[in-house]
Image: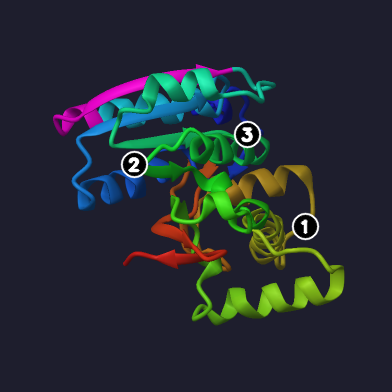
């Protein structure tokens, strides 16, 4: 929900917004010269804003767009896929449980175009399934093996917890570190937490360099054009 952080002065959010997902997707669509795009999106506070923004931006380039919305608890998406099957590409906005079924059903329905997913598609549980191979995604930098900070964190986390490292793990870790740095030499109180966040900051963490302007409440991190190739994230630039 783009307006979520505007609803209460005590609310701050550390996660990408719709525009953070849409901009890398538009870049890939442009590079692939996609002119016809289908959008299959979950009809909730996540899917609708991403759909609306992508629709606006893609149509402004002269592209042709067709869409289908699904309910959060749906598991059979073949009727929706049938409506979009003749498009050059299909973008899917949903969560991991949706993506597993949709990617599989797109393959079963022999969709031959390009497939795009949102940030949820970079979850290791999705990357590892065969049906996700070749899917284009907006990805945080944490999956780059040459980014040593994230690589070391991944190795430590997986050794300790025997679970796959993901952006959700990095998100929680990074925000705790961020707060600890901002509150250094400050009295730990509810008011001070709010105050140091409201003042804004520049922070270098596991997602790279992050900047929050004074008065803003949405702390986002950059996403980059990427593709799932053989169970790994391959960055396109």
Q: Which residues are magenta?
A: 58-70
Q: Secondary structure at mark 1?
A: loop
Using the rendered view, name the quadrant where residue 110 is placed: top left
Local crowd at mark 2 within 10 Å, few (<14), some, or many (≥20)? some
C-alpha span from label 1 to label 3: 44 Å
Asked if residue 219 is positioned above or below residue 4 in the image, the reply reads below
Q: Is residue 97 magenta?
A: no
Mark 1 or 3, nearer chain start: 3
Q: Which residue is mark 1?
A: 187
Q: Which residue is mark 2?
A: 113
Q: How is the image coloured?
A: rainbow
Residue drawn at x 41%, y 43% as measured from the top left = 115
Local crowd at mark 3 within 10 Å, few (<14), some, or many (≥20)? many
Quadrant where the C terminus lies?
bottom left
Asked if residue 142 is positioned above or below residue 26 in the image, the reply reads below
Place of residue 218 in the rendered image (x, y in percent of width and height, measured from the top left): 52, 41
Residue drawn at x 45%, y 51% as measured from the top left = 135
């Amino acid at each position: 929900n783009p307006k979520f952080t505007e609803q209460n002065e005590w609310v701050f959010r550390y996660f990408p917004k719709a525009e953070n997902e849409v901009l890398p997707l538009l870049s890939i669509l442009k590079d692939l010269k996609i002119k016809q795009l289908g959008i299959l999106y979950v009809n909730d506070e996540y899917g609708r804003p991403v759909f609306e923004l992508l629709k606006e931006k893609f149509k402004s380039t002269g592209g042709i767009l067709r869409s289908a919305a699904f309910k959060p608890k749906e598991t059979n998406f073949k009727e929706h896929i049938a409506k979009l099957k003749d498009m050059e590409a299909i973008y899917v906005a949903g969560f991991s449980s949706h993506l597993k079924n949709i990617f599989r059903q797109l393959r079963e329905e022999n969709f031959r175009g390009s497939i795009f997913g949102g940030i949820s598609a970079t979850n290791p549980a999705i990357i590892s399934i065969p049906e996700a191979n070749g899917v284009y995604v907006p990805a945080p930098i944490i999956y780059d093996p040459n980014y040593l900070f994230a690589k070391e964190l991944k190795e430590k986390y997986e050794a300790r917890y025997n679970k796959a490292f993901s952006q959700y793990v990095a998100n929680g870790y990074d925000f705790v570190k961020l707060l600890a740095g901002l509150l250094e030499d400050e009295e730990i109180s509810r008011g001070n937490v709010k105050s140091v966040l409201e003042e804004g900051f520049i922070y270098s963490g596991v997602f790279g360099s992050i900047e929050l302007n004074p008065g803003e409440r949405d702390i986002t991190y950059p996403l980059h054009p990427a593709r799932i190739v053989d169970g790994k994230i391959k960055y396109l630039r």
